[in-house]
Image: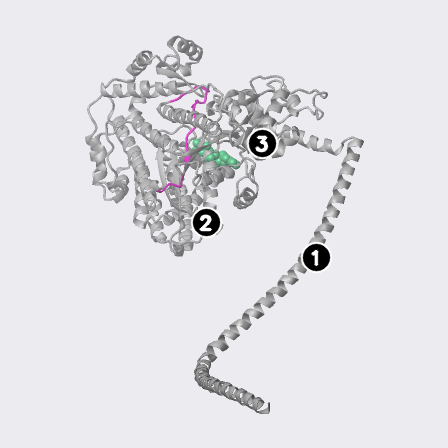
Amino acid sequence: MFPLNNNDSALLKSTQYQNDSSQNQFSIPFQYQSQNLVKQNDYKEQLPINIADIDHPDNIITLLEKTFQNGQIYIDLGQNTLISLNPFEQTNYLSDTLIQSYKKDFLNKSATQQNYQPQPHIYKLAELAKQACWSKNNSYNTCSILTQGISGSGKTVASKAILDYIAADSKSGLYISSTLNKVEIEQRIISSDIIFEAFGNAKTQKNSNSSRFGKVVSIQFEKNGKISSGKIMTTLFERTRLTQNRYIDRNYHIFYYLFTAYHKIQDLKSFAQQSQEDLKYDIVKLVEEISKLDLDSEFMLLGTQNQILISQDDQNNIEEEQRQSNEDFLNFTKLLLAFDDLDFSLEEIVNIFRCIAGLIHLKEDNYVKAEEFLMIPNLQQTINSNIEMSRLSKKLQSESIVNGIIMDFYYKLFSWIQNKINSNLSQDYDVNKKHILNVFDSFGFEIFENEYGIQQNQFEQLMLNYINEKLQNFYYFSIAENAQKKFQSENLSLLKVDFQKNDKVISVIEDVIFTSIKDCIKLQRSTQNLKDIIKKQTQEKNLQDILIDETQLKKKQEKLTQSQITHKFLQNIICIRHTGGEVYYQLDGFIQNNKYTISQDIQNINKMSSNSIIKSFTQQSQTQTVSDITQKDINEIIQMFKKSETWFIKCFQTNYLQMPQNFDKIAMKTQLSQSGIEQCFQLLYQTYLLSIPNEEFFNTYQIIFPNTKNIEEWQNALNQQIQDQNNIQFLYFGSNNVLIKEQFKRDLDCRREQMIQNQQNLPYLEIQLRQQYDEQIEIILADNEKKIQELNKKIEIKEKEAKYQQQRADYLEALQKKMIKIFEKTQGYYSQQMEELQKIKQECDNNIQALNQTQDEQSNLKSQENGKILIFGQIQDKNQQ
Ligand SMILES: Nc1ncnc2c1ncn2[C@@H]1O[C@H](COP(=O)(O)OP(=O)(O)OP(=O)(O)O)[C@@H](O)[C@H]1O
C-alpha cells in the first residue's frame, strides 16, 4: 500500500493544470480548467450538480432554483444533509409504487454496484438511515432524522414519507405477521400519527395542517429488520392556541371534527353501521354518546374561522364551508378507526370526547353542560371561590381561570393520549437493544408579523426560535464532527474552517432571558422590570452584541412609531440577533406564559371528576416553568441525537403564497439564512466528496498517467501538472479511499475517455507495430495450441496405460484375495494330510534307514563277499596258477 498522507501536502489544491503538449503526449486539458467552478457573477445556464461546485454561498439559491425548474425537489448537500423543496402540488415524488420500486432498485443495484449512488431522495435517506442502524461504523446502532424548516415548508410530509418508507416492508409482505389478531406495528404507528394530528395540529395562516408541537417518533427494529416497537416523545405543545385565536387561525382539529360529526350524525351512524364488524369497540354506542354532546350553537373555542363558515352566505364561503366540513368529517372517521388500531376502549373514547365537549361548553360559560361533560360537580362554585378582591373585574378573573383550566386540561388530555399510545406501541421497546431510528418532526424559525407587516412576536415565538437555535447548534456540531471523522478515518487532516456558530444567542436566551423571567417570578416583579433585568444581565455576561442595544432599537422604533398602530407594541420590546435574522419580542405576557397561571386549587378540581381520564391528570409543579420543561426536553433530544448517526432534512417553502411552480428567490434566501446552511457553507462545500477505494481509483485512472505503477506515483504525476497551488481542494488521497469532488471526478472520467480514444488513434507506424505484434502473438498462440494438443495426446495415452495398469492391479488384487480365501478354507485339510504325510515320511525314513542299514550290512556283506571272492579269486588264481 502507498504511504499515508496525513498533512496538507496530501491535499491537491488547484483550479488549473498545465496544458503543455510538448511535455505530455496526451495533452488534453482537464475540463476543470475551463469550467470547473461556477463563479459568483458568471453563473448562467450551467447547472451545478451539487454544493461542491459552488464557490460562494450566494449561488446556493441558483442551485436550488435550477434544480426546482428541472422538476426536482431534493438536493443533496453532503454531510447527511438533504434539502427538500415544497412544490405545493401533487407530484409523483412520494407514492407507494415509488417506495416499492425504489427499495427493489436500491437493493439490487447496491448489491451489484459498489458505489451505487441513487439520485437524492427522501427514500434514499430513509434507506441509508435504516441500514446505518446495523452499520459497524455506527457504534450506537441508532440513527436519527431531523426535519427542519419554517411552518408549511414540508417537515410533516417529509417525516411521514420516512415512516411510510420504513413501514412499507410489512406492506410489501416482506415479513409475515406473527400476531394474527393484532394490528401490525407499522399500521399502529401510522394510526398514532392520525391521532396526534387530530389533537395537536391546527389550521394556521401558513399551513392547513400545522403541527403545534415537536414530535420524535422512535422506531425499534428486530434483528431481521422488521419493526418491533415504537415510542413517541413530544415537546413544546402550544397551549396558548386554545384560548387566543389569531385572525384566520383555527383551534386544534379535534374541536371541528367533533362539531362536524355531531352535525352529521346521520352520516356518522351509517359509517358506524358499515364499520361495526371491523372494530373492537362498539362504535354504534359511541355515536349514540356523540349525539348527546349538545354541540348545537356557535362556539368561541372554535374561533373566528368557524363563525365565518357558519354565518357567511357568500357562495365561495359556502363552498369552502362544505369542503372543510367534508374534510373534517372524513378525518374524524379516520380518527375513529385509528383509535381502534391502538386499542382505545369505548369508555376511553367517550371520556375523551366528553372532555372536549366539556371544554367547549366551559368557554361559553355554560357551566351546566361543562359540569355534565367534564363530570365535575360544583365547577362554577369552585371557580367563583377562586376569584379574589383585586383590581381586575370578576368577569376578567373568571375568564382567566377558565382559560387556565382549558389550557391545563387539554394539554393533560394530550399527554394522556400520548401515554396511552406509547403503552400500546412500546411494549417491547428497549433502548439497550439498539437498532433504533428516531424521526423528529421539529420546528422552524418563526417571525410572526401582523396584518401591517409589523413583527409581533411573543413568548411562544421565543420558545420556537430557542429550540430552533439549539437544533441549529447541534447541526453545526454534527456536520463538523462527521467531516472530522471522515477525514480521520482516512488519516487525513481537515483544513480548518471557521463558521459562524450560535452559542452566544443560546446563552442570551438560556442564561439571560430565562433566568431573568425566573427572577421576576421569584421576586414577583412585573414585565416592566423584566426588560431592565435582561439588559443588566446581558451586560454582565458580555453578550451585548446579540441583544440590539437601546440606541439602535430607538432609531428603529422611531421609524416604526411614525405609524400609530405600532406605537403601543414597541413600548416593551427586546430584539435578538438570531441565526435567521433580527427578531423583536413583545415582553408583555412573557412572565405569565412561562408559568402555570392556574392556582393549585383549580388544578385540583380534576380530582372531583368522575371521568376517569380527567381524574387521572397529575398536577403540574407550580415552580416548574415552560422554559424549564422545554430546555430539559430539547437537551434530552439532542443528547439522544448525539448518541446516534444523524441525518438532516432542511425543508423550504418555495414561496409564501403556497403556489405551485413558483420559486420566490427572496423567500428562499431568507429561509436559507435561517436554515444554518449559509453559516456552514464552507464546511459543506469543502467536504462534499465522493469516496472511491484506492485500488479502484488507480485501476480506473492509471491510464491518465500510463507510466505510473502505483497510486503514489499517480499522485506525484498529477501534482507536477498543477500550476497553481491555490486554496481549492478537490482531491484527497486517504489511506483507504480517494476522496474526490464529483465535478473533478467527471473531469477525470472525461480525460480517461479521451486517453482511450487517443490510443485508438495511434499513428500509422504504431498501428503497424501493433499489427506485427498482434501477428507474432497469434503465431505464438497457434504454436502453443499445437504443443498443447500433442501434450494432450500423450497424456491420453499415458492415461490409457495407467488405466490398464490399474485394471491389472485390481485383477491381481482380486485374485490374491481369492487365494487367501481358498487358503483359509483349505488350511485344516492340508495340515491333516501333512501329518499323515509326516507319518508316511517317518515310516519311509525308518524304512530307508532300515534299508540303508540293510544295504550297509549288505555292502559289508558284499565286501566281505568280495573279499571272499577276491580271496576266492586269488585262491582260484592261485589255484589256476
Ligand atoms: N413533498 C411535497 N409534495 C407536495 N406537497 C407538499 C410536500 N411537502 C409539503 N407539501 C404541502 O405543504 C403543506 C405543508 O406541509 P407540512 O404540513 O409538512 O409543513 P410543516 O413544515 O410540517 O409545517 P408545520 O411546521 O406548520 O407543521 C402540506 O400539507 C402539503 O400540501
Determine the residue positioned at 54% across, 46% down. 104
Q: Residue furthest front?
A: 881
**Nearer-the-camera pick, 851 or 707:** 851
Q: Secondary structure at mark 1?
A: helix
Q: Secondary structure at mark 3?
A: loop
Dot 3 or dot 2: first in sequence order is 2
Find the magenta span and give its range. Answer: 433-457
Query: Is residue 302 in view?
Result: yes
**Nearer-the-camera pick, 12 or 251:** 12
Tag 2: amino acid: Ser
Q: Are marks 2 and 1 in contact (CB under 8 Å)?
A: no
Dot 2 or dot 1: first in sequence order is 2
Which residue position holds label 1? 793
Up/down of 480 relative to 794, above or below: above
Cα distance between the residues tagged 3 and 1: 78 Å
Of circles 2 and 1, the one toward us is 1
Which residue position holds label 2? 170
Tag 1: amino acid: Lys
Q: Main secondary structure of the magenta part?
A: loop
Up/down of 831 relative to 802, above or below: below
**Nearer-the-camera pick, 468 or 202:** 468
Which residue position holds label 3? 661
